Amino acid sequence: MSDRHHQLLVHGATFAAVGAGGDIRGVPGGTAPDGLFVRDARHLSRWQLTVDGAVPEVLTPVTASAAGTSAPGTDTGVARCVLVPRGGRQEPPAYTLFREQAVVDGALVEALRITSNRPVPTTLRLAVTADADFTDQFELRSDHRTYAKTGAVRSRRVLTADADGPRAEIRTRPGTSGRAPHGGPAQPRPEGVEFGYRRGDWIARTSVTSEPAPDAVEETGTGARRLVWTLELDAHGSADMALTVTAGPHGAPPRPAPPRSPGAALAQLTEAEREFTSAVTPPTGWPELAAACTRGLADLASLQVPARGPDGEELSVPAAGVPWFLTLLGRDALLTSLFALPYLPRLAAATLPALAATQATEHTEGRVAQPGKIVHEVRHGELAHFGQVPFGRYYGSVDATPLFLVLLGAYTEQTGDTALARRLQPHARAAVGWMLDHGGLTSRGYLVYRADEGGLANQNWKDSPGAICDADGTRALGPVMAAGAQGYAYDALRRTAWLARTVWDDEVYAALLAQTAADLRDRFQRDFWMPARSFPALALDGNGGQVDALASDAGHLLWSGLLDKEYGEAVGRRLLEPDFFSGWGVRTIAAGQGAYHPLSYHRGSVWPHDNALITLGLARYGLHDEARTVAHALVDAATTAAGRLPEVLAGYEREAYPAPVPYPHACVRESRSAAAPLALLTAVGGA
């Protein structure tokens, strides 16, 4: 998603995407939807401000101020814009409207200040039209799918206060007046509106309240409701208003009342960011990397979503990214935690038990679940609840399970904390069991996956259709053995062998795993290596044939240590050749092959997290100059965007344009990319 169209505000499991004037239109189409989203549902689909029946003109478009220690240009804080009525040179604006918005977990809060520019008293009619369609995020993707919702019922009701209860006066600035006229006989007064949705046992709601309360709540004929205030302003007077949109998503635990102002929300975000950014001392010798680390840490602070551990304990774990993946994805959370491990071990300490709690214990065909397998994706939306998409708990990943073991071993080694490894020993052994049994290591010699008709065709990190292909673009057929996953399996076996030997006191198990890892390494270099190209195949197909595209996954093999030194050095240097290296990073597929497309998701684009793994791998094999080259390219890319790395960039060479060309459907904020600068710092240091 691009900031060209929306401003994103994120906090925990909640995000809002608003237009240039702070409005939400809920118009379908585009690369990403606007609205307020909580737990995969759109809880606000329309939010439109009018004054005297007209939409104001944007004088200053929505921009976001920094939250606390965030890097410049952050959009995790308060979004601000300035609006005026439409007019010409000879008609100076009658008023100016200052708008501020922020999100906290489960709510959008907004502050409005309207200032009269006239030297005489003025009466204005301000209105906010609101609606909530509760659309599932999967319905908003541009995949042309439709989903039946038999029995769904929507409701709208006006929230009222007791006739004798207090009514808030409009807060005014000193020396001005601003009041909503009212009087007459006592009667129930509107305090706001609540939108509801029910389908079977699925129930969700959204409430809109304000201070002061509206003078009226009007029907619009479309299902939306219009909250209306009549404001009487003195000459050059001002009036302040506060609005709160509170989501009541299905299945969510009770939340504390949201703060009453964007400023109070900003304070919450500032504290969360401070906890993250204080964990890292930015490198003084490389200020651009320091800025990228600070920016990434601030993004990680905003991307924490709730989860539970094996004993029901409450945890906060990294979500994958916004707008499409503000939820727990196993692979993403594991890699994010690995990148951040030397600086923020708390991420690993939360991610590991959260994934242990969702580890599969039985075979479930529609979810690709098998005993011991680590979850790929957890969803809370309506379609997942009713099984219309398989992603409530979906296990279509061949690599989350070995990465779980890699992180558990790395966390124990890094921190010296053996308690977590002891606690999760049954889960770790079950994960190893899955790799050996259902995963295919024993029967096929490699981790293997098969296309899931109702879910993902490819189940490694390059999970888009057609991503695993020959150099000419022909898709791999049958069961697939992806190269990168074998590297993860090798590392997982070695690290778990170390845990068995040093923590679990099981030398027999340790020896078994160590031998299995050694056999995998020998077998891989025999079956995957392409002598004529001095490079490993991207995968093996169902017949054991090499899928011969030259792909960046080879760099993951360096990170895992799967290749012999001679092979590893050859691969590392090859990844820096011009067909691979764009100047902004290593492409997922080398240019010049029939499969290459610079604007594809996985066949020629540049992924920051992919490059972070490659950089760590280059450093592991002693290719420090090459590692610095890739690190500097990524940092340069981040510098063009105020220190932030998106999910993915287009694969065009650096000489083609002075800044990286964006991939149109990328998550702007993504946890793996946010943590990538930390991996660069680990790989090459701060100079």
Image: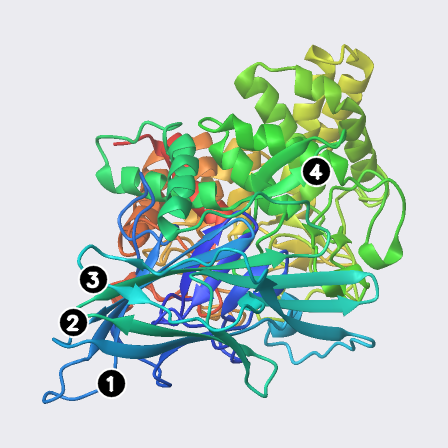
Question: For the residues marked 4 and 2, what is the alpha-carbon distance in whole angstroms?
Answer: 61 Å
Q: Is residue 232 above or below residue 687?
A: below
Q: In this view, does 106 lie above or below 63?
A: above
Q: Do the residues labelled 3 and 2 touch (CB within 8 Å)?
A: no
Label 4: few (<14), some (14–19) or many (≥20) C-alpha neighbours in 10 Å? many
| Amino acid type, mark 4 | Leu
| Amino acid type, mark 1 | Arg
Closest to the observer, 466 or 259: 259
At horizontal 38% and vertical 55% (from top left) the residue drawn is 581
Question: For the residues marked 4 and 3, what is the alpha-carbon distance in whole angstroms?
Answer: 56 Å
Question: For the residues marked 2 and 1, what is the alpha-carbon distance in whole angstroms?
Answer: 20 Å
- Residue underneath mark 2: 235
**What x and y, as percent, mark residue 686?**
29, 31
Label 2: few (<14), some (14–19) or many (≥20) C-alpha neighbours in 10 Å? some
Task: Judge depth for marks 2 and 1 and give the one in front.
Answer: 2
- Residue underneath mark 4: 355
In which quadrant of the rendered image does the C terminus lie? top left
Question: For the residues marked 3 and 2, what is the alpha-carbon distance in whole angstroms?
Answer: 8 Å
- Residue underneath mark 3: 176
Give the mark, 4 or 1, whose residue is nearer the N terminus.
1
Closest to the observer, 544 or 306: 306
| Amino acid type, mark 2 | Ala
